[in-house]
Image (cartoon, rainbow, N blue to C red):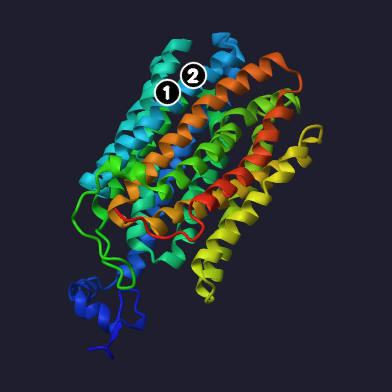
Amino acid sequence: MAGFRQQDFWGRHSQKGAFVSKHPEIMSTSASNTGAPSHRWVILALLFFATTINYIDRQILALLKPMLDAELGWTNEQYGYVNSAFQAAYAFGLVGFGWFIDRFGVKIGYAVSIFAWSAAAAAHALVGSVGGFRWARVALGVGEGGNFPAAIKTVAQWFPRSERAFANALFNSGTNIGALIAPAVIPLIAINYGWRSTFVVAGVLGVIWIFFWIPLFKEAPKLADEEITSNRKVPWLSLLGKRQAWAYMVAKFLTDPVWWFYLIWLPDYFKREQHLDLKSSALPLVVLYGIVTVLSIFAGWLVKRLAESGHDIVKVRKVSMLIFALCSLPIFFVRGLGMWESVLLIAFGASAHQAWSASLYATISDTFPKEAVASVSGLGGFVGSIGGMIFPIVAGRILDANVNGYAVLFGFCAFAYVIAFAIHHMLVPRLEMADV
């Protein structure tokens, strides 16, 4: 049987004799999943739309800040605390849903998550105080914690190792599309129908997504060239003893706050530094996130081509992460530029973040078996959200106290990735699989 040429579920032939002789269930699984290669794109499209809705929900409060400033009279620090409450809840939501998804599966876990965050988004329409917004953001944060653990685990189940960075980049581009759609649509809805209506619309979108997810989701067939996934449950606390988990967590802690900074503070940046109101800030934000979408998908495609061209996957992953880290450095010089120069430079830096994140997500399935992927993703997201929880408070205080506050904040955004890459590389220089 050593010379048997087995067809895997992608439709390609490869020498798998010894592997199949040990694991004959692979042949039956592959054979029973005809059409799986095309259906994986349906699954990926669902991940993309869920992530898009997720980021429309997150962006609403930042876009409404100029309107709510007048109604609530809150300070930048209070606004920072409201966003920090979201981050704290999101951190625990990531860990909780990471465990829940590994325990009960992606189909159930994702549906529960998006229903919870859709209900929380709609609940924003019922509040009218700083305290009310704080609790509404807490509920939203808990629900949204399931998105990335579910999406990353799904990609690990459906895509081979060489294609995961590209698949991650595609579904993760929903973060850009959501951030692009929101400034184009949310101000118009708020101006014409009131700010409360925007949250109701966001909640309805999530419920609609569930009606597609339930019938269209299918369990992935096993990949013949990947590790066998067992039904065992990995003890959650045991993951904390693995340097592979810490490499991911530290990288998330340092770089996640940068993306949250872009989402939370860019509308305020354009108002304070570029003197744009709610209506006039829509175009630069739409252009900015449009550029981010194109560049981040291109970066993911380029990583995929390099991996498929025969280059060592570890070298591809490491070199790409280093390049994306270096591409974040120019953001240091954004302060003092004109509006469109700022848009282009911030777009380049945000694109580097998204490309970095897609490759970083792929390192989870590089270093952990699939039954632990959602849990590790949740742990990393938890730590990243702790950083994201601290940063809005610090940013608010810096901006309230310092006229050059944005120079300080963009300085952190510039160097966070280089530091994160150095630490990640020291902990897992070869991206070897953790023994769990």
Q: Which mark is first along the chain, 2 or 1?
A: 2
- Residue 309, compared with residue 157, is above or below; it is below
Q: What label sits on residue 82 in the rendered view?
A: 2
In the visual, does 305 lie left or right of 125?
right
- At label 1, counting other C-alpha atoms closer than 10 Å, the crowd grade (few under 14, some 14-19, many 20 or more) is many
Please state which of residues 179 and 105 is positioned toward the viewer in this rendering.
Answer: 105
In the visual, does 80 lie left or right of 243?
right
Please give the residue where the numbered disc 1 appears in the rendered image. Answer: 137
Residue at the spot 55% in from the left edge and 65% down from the top edge: 316
Place of residue 327 in the rendered image (x, y in percent of width and height, measured from the top left) = 68, 50
Residue at the spot 78% in from the left edge and 38% down from the top edge: 333
Residue at the bottom extreme of this rendering: 3
Residue at the spot 35% in from the left edge and 83% down from the top edge: 14
Q: What is the three-letter code of the residue carrying label 1?
A: Arg
SS of the residue under disc 2: helix
Place of residue 229 in the rendered image (x, y in percent of width and height, measured from the top left) = 25, 61
SS of the residue under disc 1: helix
Q: Is residue 191 visible?
A: no
